[in-house]
Image (tube, rainbow, N blue to C red):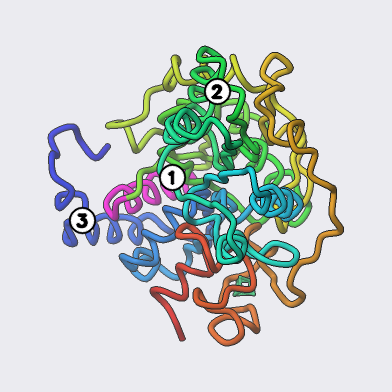
Amino acid sequence: MTGEKMKFIDEYRDASAVRTYADKIAEITTRPWNIMEICGGQTHAIMRFGIDQLLPPEITLIHGPGCPVCVTPVEILDKAIEIAGRDDVIFCSFGDMLRVPGSRKDLLTVKAEGGDIRTVYSPMDTLKIAIESPDKQVVFFAVGFETTAPSTAATILQAHRRKLTNLSMLVAHVLVIPAMEAILSSPDNRVQGFLAAGHVCTVTGYAVYEKLVDKYEIPIVVTGFEPLDLAQGIYLCVRQLEKGASLVENQYARAVKRDGNQPALQTVNRVFEETDRRWRGIGLIPQSGLKLRGEFAEFDAENRFEPANQVTHESTGCISGQILQGAKKPYECPAFGKRCTPEHPLGATMVSSEGACAAYYLYRKP
Ligand code: SF4
């Protein structure tokens, strides 16, 4: 939709083009609709560029659980904290995870206490660290959706090939579609249309949503992250809702193909299999996570270190579970902007660069 003719980011941020789509949405809207953007990156773009404020009052955007840092369960985070505190471990993680509160402390506190915790930008960085540090155990905290799982899988294949015995992964990868299905099958569901996460779909493709569309008769529009992408995605979704249609549409055609990235998917399938997974604030979602196949069990940090299952504790008063399911907005939390800020977060949704609470704090602070 946003045309292969465009070359520069500014063109996707052209305010007049975005307003044109906002006007088109207003023209076709005849009644209230609830649309969920699944991805936290989209939530931040909507807040940052004020897309929600351009829409007619009938359109409500509901922010979904597509922030991997936010949904990583506290029991896995507590295990990460335990492993990271060991003397023989170099613990590697994406930066966002370091400040997420565990039951008793966060990873940044472990680092302050002397733990060797390193921020990496790709799991592949951990290969180099493991090769250069043969007397240490290197552990990568593998967090993320379908978007990051291929690079974790490729790293494990490399480690396997090189017969590295000092690299392992604490795996917390989650899958988008089971989460969407959990939302749709909930008796409290309010979502009538989805903006699917464009970057996830660069890996999965969009054909994978066809079953969901058929089963729940709901429009799903694969959507990008720039203001014009979002305005177009919402327009396509409202157009379907007004017509009573339920189709998968691809707004993000410049990056997403019907069948996705097959080499990436094959790499993930070679290394991982689906498993039930708890989502922080939401609970267990069947077959919504990835675990290492038996062949690669030697790279599983849980097997290698056997961290204890601890009694978990979460901040009372944090309603991030309701926010992640779209039931409440961040400003409805009594702690928002008072007891809970990005400097002193009570919940993961205030820490992550994709968290809804952080988005509202940054762009809509009361
Ligand atoms: S504002 Fe803070 S306490 Fe409230 S839901 Fe968000 S993260 Fe939790």
Which quadrant would residue 227 be assigned to in this image?
bottom left
Give the spatial CA distance, label 2 vs label 1: 16 Å
What residue is rendered at 36% in x and 59% in y?
A: 45
- Residue 137 part of the magenta segment: no
Q: Earlier in the sequence, mark 2 or mark 1?
A: 1
Q: Which residue is mark 2?
A: 156
Discs 3/2, front = 2
- Residue type, numbered disc 1: Val
Q: Which residue is mark 1?
A: 120
Is 270 situated above or below 42?
above
Q: Which residue is mark 3?
A: 13
- Magenta segment, which residues? 226-242
Q: Is residue 137 left or right of residue 283?
A: left
Disc 1, SS:
loop
Q: Earlier in the sequence, mark 3 or mark 2?
A: 3
Q: Position of residue 314 (x, y in %)?
A: 76, 67
Classed neighbour count for the residue bearing mark 1: other residues with Cα under 10 Å, few (<14), some (14–19), many (≥20): some
- Residue type, numbered disc 3: Arg
Give the spatial CA distance, label 3 vs label 2: 38 Å
- Asked if labels 1 and 2 touch by Cβ distance under 8 angstroms, the answer is no
Is 179 situated above or below 312?
above
Q: Position of residue 192 (x, y in %)?
A: 58, 50
